[in-house]
Amino acid sequence: MEDLPTHSPLVHFNEIRPRVVDEVVRRTLSEVPPEKVESELTAALYLERLRLQRERPSLFTFRRLNRDRKLWREIQSDLLKPSALADRQGMFKNVAARYAEEIAGHFDSKIYRYATKILPYGFNWLLNAASVKSILPWGMTEDVRNRLKVEGEIAHLRKLTQIGTVLLVPTHQSNIDSILIGYVIYLMGLPPFAYGAGLNLFSNPLLSFLMSNLGAYTVDRQKGNRIYKALLKNYSVKILREGIHSIFFPAGGRVRNGAIESKLKLGLLGTALEAQIENLRAGKTSPKVFIVPMTTSYHFVLEASTLIDDHLAEAGKHRFIITDDESSKFSKVVHFFWKLFKSQSGMTVRVGKPLDIFGNFVNEEGNSIGPNGTMIAPEKWLSSYGELKTSPSRDNEYTRMLGARIVERYHAENTVLTSHLVAFTFFESLRNRYPDYDLYRLLRMSLAQRTLPMDEFLKEAEGMHRRILEAADQQLFHITPELRTVDVKSWVKDGIRNLGLFHGNAVLKREGNVLYSEDMNLLYYYRNRLAGYGLSRLADPKRRVPGAQDEKGFLI
Amino acid sequence: MRKEFWSKSSVAVIGGGSWGTVLAKLAAQNCEQVRLWVRDEDQARAMNSTRSNPTYVKEMTIPENVRTFTDIERVFDQGVQAIIWALPASACRETARRFAPLFHGDEMVLHATKGVEEGSMKRISVILAEELPLARIGVLSGPNLATEIARDEPAATVVASDFLEVVEAGMSLFNTPRFRVYAGDDVIGVEWAGTLKNIYAIAAGALDALEFGWNARALLLTRGLAEMVRFGVAMGAKESTFLGLGGAGDLFATCSSPLSRNYRVGQRLARGEALDPILSELGAVAEGVRTAQIISAFAVERKIPMPITQGVFELIRGTTPVNDVLRMLMQRPVGYDASAELGEFASRRRT
């Protein structure tokens, strides 16, 4: 454990932190033309006052909120004074400095060492305590690593962290993701990564202490003003430029409907391209930024109920940030892991094929591969009118290309688990029985309607299994080894047992010769993991576009 | 500054047909030099020595700063900033694959090809993106009968790309006192419009052979445009693109010129001649024939209503005489006109 990889600048982050903060502030200020400073401040003041009215202080946040209130009161009264008496640039700088201090994380290598030591112990303790009743003989411990399958381009990723800066872009289903991915990075022997975490997670002092010392920086999505957004973007560019590997969840938040992300937020994603251009212009020896997609596959998602209800209520727009779901309660999180280890079920994390900033594949040496194996010169793609420089319209288009490619890779790198297939098959069987029902009617079916005879289900499952195997051969996605069997009953059993294990209601329950769903919303949530592939018999496979819905409101 | 950049640039034109040669002449007025690639050794020699292209555009003088090559490496050897791609659709992928190693990645590629790849139905810009190691690709299309532009008659075109820089390149390179370049961002729409209009040129030729007047032609063009919109929107294009130069503009020009090959095919089919002898006599590809075959099958499969295309397809197959095709088209149930399509009219009346 002593050999903490030292080639990551994150390890020495505390030394460079003041400089980073200062540069981010200065850069943000320089991007605003002097005559616009006042109007930017006014707009921010308006939004911040709304936010401060909205936010409820808690024991841990009231101090921060009070500080914010004081700052914005001052800004308000200063804005009323003539600019000769209250320097607008100075005010802007104050605001920016406050934000930058809030955003910037710390990194404490001591804490990192302890945490990575303690975390697996914690996991293992839970694992063994939970397994007491299981068949494991005394003295034999099951390693957490057996439960957690990490697959894909691990060696490739490791190599790229040594020749450039890596931006890891995972799919996002649960708040567990951050903890899990942080641990997976450690398991792979990689240096620590910086990542943005929602400010609401920092309100728990223990989590806050740990996270902020493990490379997390804060992202507060309640702050919608442009000054904050610019700072966040510049901070992200800056740490990438410092060579600090980072993690973004490019969809912005957890996916609500359970499907694989089809729409990404391109703003932050574009920082990779910006960082690489600046690196090239500065003549840095390892200027490249590599984008590595990552997918996580769970049999159950802790917050599934809240997420799918939010999606179905179409309240997503108003309640974009859920602060009070299952994952915010420490006991629930512990309970989750307890269940996880007790259930003997696993999760799969897959490292996708690394991409360059345009979405082209890169090889082991970090070179971009073009059509038919030709090499691509990124600095040429970044030159316009004979000069290597940023160009907003061009770079937006490149980032759009990258986003489209990440969505495509998410689908291809997804690992289908037995539970996903069981949920999908059951849901589609119901749809076939009631083809006229739209989504909402289907979700409100009576218990009798959402019950299927077991043999009918098994027949459907057999057909669906065949299609899944074909699709896996065509590399539309990966499948878990449990699905590589001719014995339909065995994977169906595994799937039913694992599907949404955590929830109070069984997503699917077998009783005698029938199978029924106790919670149709959850069934829909887990079923959606296989949407976007055109596997549904009712979907026109030629029209499938990730995220598209058919005329009855089902994800295709 | 952009204009200035392009005025000092080298531009490659791939393809020395009539349109490629005319585009080379236009670009030569706005850049340092044009390097034109043609396949045929004799043609290249003739063009360099006589400053004309006797095979395709006889009467036009080729400017001094256009140099013609058959060796592609010489076209690229001093670096070019833009490539104008003017090859037939059928040669696109194979040629692109062969030339790909010569590209650096900072070039802008504008193609002026009308048509799609057979079999895959992929658009030209998609094929180029799949084969060339660069991303900045656009399309140039419009009512551009090459012979008229060779004579310096007034004309205009549209350049569309996802990249603003490519559009700017097209505008800087091809704008001349007699030729206007408009900007567009709907690559899908411009490419499909340029492909589909050839079908209606065949129909226009057939109407001509039947000696109908202007009403019939207007009917064809208007309802043809409606079909193009339906198809284009189904493929992801914007409806408004079809009102522009690449849509309606190109359709009007193509269907009005008795010189176009598609038009002549239609004329002779309507007189009862069989397809094969017509094609072998014309000695050149009439793109509309292939397009009608591909699109009619695809439209049936996707349930896109395209009756005129189906009619042209019947005519090409030679199983139905032209009068029967016409009767079939004229006796279809009458629906809504363009503004009230999709039953919008009915619902508006009800409220």
Image (spheres, coloured by chain):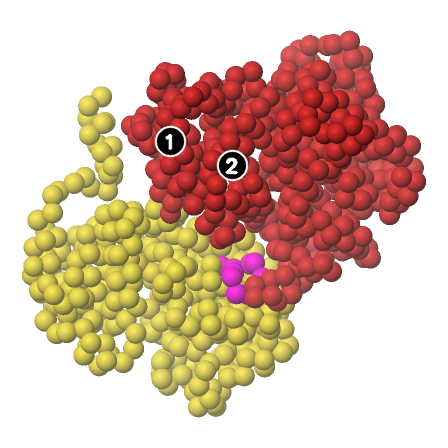
Chain colours: A red, B yellow
Question: Which residue is label 2 attached to?
Answer: A491
> What residue appears at the point 77 percent right and 14 percent down from the top-left corner?
A61
Chain under disc 1: A
Q: Nearer the viewer, residue B133 or B302?
A: B302
Position of residue A486 measured from the top left corner of the image (x, y, whole percent) = 48, 44
Q: Nearer the viewer, residue B203 or B132?
A: B132
Task: Estimate the spatial distance between the alpha carbons at disc 1 and disc 2, rounded to whole Å.
Answer: 15 Å
Residue A219 visible from this viewpoint: no
Q: Which mark is residue A455?
A: 1
What crowding class fits label 2: few (fewer than 14 Cα within 10 Å), some (14-19), or many (20 or more)?
A: many
Element on which disc 1 rests:
helix
Q: Is residue B60 magenta?
A: no
Residue A143, by quadrant, is: top right
Residue B144, by quadrant, is: bottom left
Say which quadrant the C terminus of chain B sits in.
top left
Position of residue A194 measured from the top left corner of the image (x, y, whole percent) = 77, 37
Q: Which residues are magenta?
A: B129-138
Q: On the picture, is B295 further left or further right than B155? A: left
Amino acid carrying label 2: it is Trp
Using the image, determine if residue A545 lies above or below residue A180: below
Q: Nearer the viewer, residue B108 or A503?
A: A503
Q: On the picture, is A371 further left or further right than A168? A: left
